[in-house]
Amino acid sequence: MGDLKLTTVEEMEAATARLLETGAKVGADAWQLRVKNQTPHCKFGEQGVCCRICAMGPCRITPKAPRGICGCDVHGIVGRNYLKFTAGGAATHSDHGREICHTLYEAKPDGAYKVKDPEKLIRIAKEWGVETEGKDIYDLAHEMAETALMEYGKPFGVQRWLKRAPEHTQKLWHDAEIEPRAIDREVATSLHMAHMGCSSLPEALVRQSLRAGLADGWGGSMCGTEFSDVLFGTPKPLDTEANLGVMNADNVNIVVHGHDPSLSEMVCEYADDPEMIAYAKSMGAKGITVSGVCCTSNEVAMRRGVPMAGNFLQQENVVLTGACEAIVVDVQCIFPALGPLSKCFHTKFITTSPIAQMPDSDYIRFDVGTAAEKAKQIVMTACENFKNRKPDLVYIPDMKQKATVGYSFEALVKTLDGVTNSQVDVTGTTKPLIECITSGVIRGAVAMVGCNNPKIRPDYAHIELMKKLIANDIVVVASGCSAQAAAKAGLMDKAAKDLCGAGLKRVCELADIPPVLHMGSCVDISRMMVLVAELAKDSGLNISQLPVVGCAPEWMSEKAVSIGNYVVATGIDTFLGVDPYVAGSSEMGQWLTEGVRDWVEAAYTVETDIEKLVDKMIDRIEEKRTALGI
Ligand code: MSK
């Protein structure tokens, strides 16, 4: 197995247990304890059969009470809850995208935010039919930002990004009436439909769920990804490290957590500033270490090589090390628990966004106009806090893995270009990858995404599924906390090729890639949509015919449901390890696992047994290969 030694889930659990001992000493709460307090969960909630969308209830559906007070049956209640869940996720991702557009609008050659990838900006402008000739790049950036912002509220037409999809997919969306219009409109329409006295027909609620999801994946998230690349650079393969051992006991440790790279990029920029490093030294530290948690971590890892301290369910662990001077957060997936927890240590819990304000935090409001000064203030605050550390509470698990990250669509195409033996010039296309798949060297691909969830042993499903997939010559592209689980375990180390079947191992060697490819954060699942769209166009197949599936084995957030809806709606069968609160309705179950296939040629599979889940994915990939005769 070469020089690779994977970090096992058992080893990570032992490290967590040790950290929880520190927590117990200082009277800290932890999610492991709160799960116990919340168990058993409410059965009505679990099945999605509780309705509190008006004040006549709440109503709960039981065999004795099969309808709510308004007369809505269980299928309507479950369906409305599902649509509202989706709308929450679509709103969240899309608002993140909107913030990036605003940042781009404020970009200036001498400002805190600059255009780092002008070629990409020009490429997108041409795609959108915006004149680029002779235009100053910043004028173009402002025009494109404004055009993108109009996508959120335009009164007529459908999303601009949809044109990136193969014509067949666009036709499916049109025929099923799920082409997303203005991004905000799909969120608002979803909430309207789920209001008391509106839709209670599962078919209509599922249709709108797909549409709202598409407004996210082929709308708001795509704005987030594409314009983040324009602002901060399109990711290229970079070496980094992952797991709690990336924190450094001798240094000021700043942990960035959340999603929007506008904050984390600026904090990283200042943490590298010689003036700040000198300031840290004047406080008794040897330097400054920035590491990340959740998707912010993915953003700065793939553009700067900033190490990844952990994923969603490790966010408390970074504070429990006793060596975290500041945990700096923006939006999404942030435990309010970080407030009281940080009070048990010297850690500053710094919130920065009006969208995510929490008790027991230091609020340093961050905005585009004052980004540089606020980032400097944050770094200085962390440095000054070094002296407050309690040495007897410091314990950083000696646990980290090498990882190569940063496989944006552009980087992936470029990297795989060298793999084929074909004499045909395939530069800039996905044809080398198609050749690997059609020849059977690679059997297919799985997009592994999503969170951790205490309902599943943390990281276990991500890591075990990936190990089995790569052993079966199935390449994995990963994003979000799934990507971090892979990195922490060692699956993004190029040496992980030794865990692959012979075909995938050969491809990893030829292309010099790890078998699990890091594609970025949650919004970057839009990169995966671009990848499958190009694979379909370059192969002449429909997306649904490709031996490709999606999987979120440990998902927990509303955003994940929105993602699932757009991945399915794009024609990719999607496998979930956690039920999206629809178990209470046979009709909703039927629509999501079968009915939607008539519209978009793909559907969901929900399987909570992880062994069965991976086998079902492999079977599905092999069925698709058989149907293609390859
Ligand atoms: S951070 S949505 S826990 S993947 Fe994007 Fe991780 Fe899930 Fe948040």
Image (tube, helix red, strand yellow):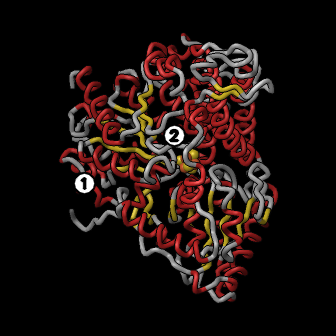
Q: Is mark 2 on a helix, strand or loop?
A: helix
Q: Does the residue labelled 2 lie within 8 Å of ligand 1?
A: no
* Residue under label 2: 525
Q: What element carries label 1?
A: helix
Task: Give the spatial CA distance, label 1 vs label 2.
Answer: 25 Å
Of the two numbered discs 1 and 2 on the same chain, state the one appearing first in sequence: 1
Q: Are marks 1 and 2 in contact (CB under 8 Å)?
A: no
Residue 436 location in percent, x, y?
26, 37
What residue sits 53% from the left and 61% below the top?
A: 314
What residue sits 70% from the left and 34% below the top?
A: 148
Find the residue positioned furthest to the front: 64
* Front residue (pair 327, 240): 327
* Residue under label 1: 499
Taking the image as drawn, is residue 425 in sight?
no
Q: Disc 2 marks which amino acid?
A: Ile
Q: How crowded is mark 1: few (under 14 residues within 10 Å), some or many (20 or more)?
A: many
* Front residue (pair 261, 116): 261
